Image: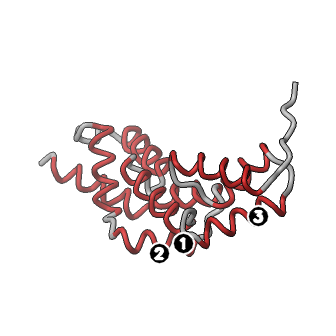
């Protein structure tokens, strides 16, 4: 059983978009994808989304800022955030502006994440160090941030 898209009137599309936006911020691409599943009429959806942007009810910049904040809170690095936000249809320039405004210390964040995961335990051997490096790489931190985080943990043990 497949769900047939409804006929698209701008009022219905706008109402559905507003319902979605009351829960959280959406990128324009995400919103368009969700509305496209529900309604026929690409031009009507595009027109409604244009109007929502003009009214300030939908903003990719605001979405990028909220997305960045939530991912920093989760302990993710910039590489991972950049990869995930691209999948949401956000351009790098919007993310770069949000990163600049956030003034996040990525080195400190990498250290906090490592301490949270490994409890400040000293690195036992090369295998343990490789495990920690892989974990931080997966979280989206670059090599310099990982090196700094792990060296800080090693210094704390003395």
**In screen coordinates, is 20 left or right of 65?**
right
Q: Front-most of 36 and 104?
A: 36
Disc 3 designates what residue?
A: 46
- Can you give x and y, in whole percent of width and height, for residue 139 in the image? 46, 49
Q: Nearer the viewer, mark 2 or mark 3?
A: 3
Please report the residue visible at 76 percent of the width from the left and 64 percent of the height from the top: 46
Residue 94's tag is 1
Disc 2 designates what residue?
A: 97
Please report the residue visible at 68 percent of the width from the left and 55 percent of the height from the top: 14
In the rendered structure, are the residues bearing label 2 and label 3 in contact, judged by CB atoms less than 8 Å apart?
A: no
At label 1, counting other C-alpha atoms closer than 10 Å, the crowd grade (few under 14, some 14-19, many 20 or more) is some
- Can you give x and y, in whole percent of width and height, for residue 109 in the image? 32, 56
What is the quadrant of the N terminus in the image?
top right
The part of the image, by quadrant, that contains residue 94 is bottom right
Distance from the alpha carbon under mark 3 to that under mark 1 = 20 Å
**In screen coordinates, is 50 left or right of 143?**
right
In the rendered structure, are the residues bearing label 1 and label 2 in contact, judged by CB atoms less than 8 Å apart?
A: yes
Task: Give whichever of discs 3 and 1 has the lower sequence position.
Answer: 3
């Amino acid at each position: 059983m497949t769900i047939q898209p409804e006929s698209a009137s701008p009022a219905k599309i706008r109402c559905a978009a507003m319902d979605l936006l009351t829960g959280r911020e959406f990128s324009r691409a995400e919103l368009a994808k969700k509305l496209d599943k529900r309604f026929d009429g690409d031009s009507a959806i595009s027109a409604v989304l244009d109007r929502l942007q003009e009214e300030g009810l939908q903003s990719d910049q605001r979405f990028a800022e909220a997305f960045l904040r939530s991912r920093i809170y989760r302990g993710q690095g910039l590489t991972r955030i950049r990869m995930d936000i691209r999948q949401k249809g956000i351009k790098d320039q919007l993310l770069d502006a949000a990163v600049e405004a956030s003034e996040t210390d990525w080195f400190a964040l990498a250290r906090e994440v490592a301490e949270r995961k490994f409890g400040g335990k000293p690195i036992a051997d090369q295998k343990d160090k490789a495990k920690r490096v892989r974990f931080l790489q997966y979280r989206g931190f670059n090599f310099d941030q990982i090196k700094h985080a792990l060296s800080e943990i090693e210094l704390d043990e003395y």
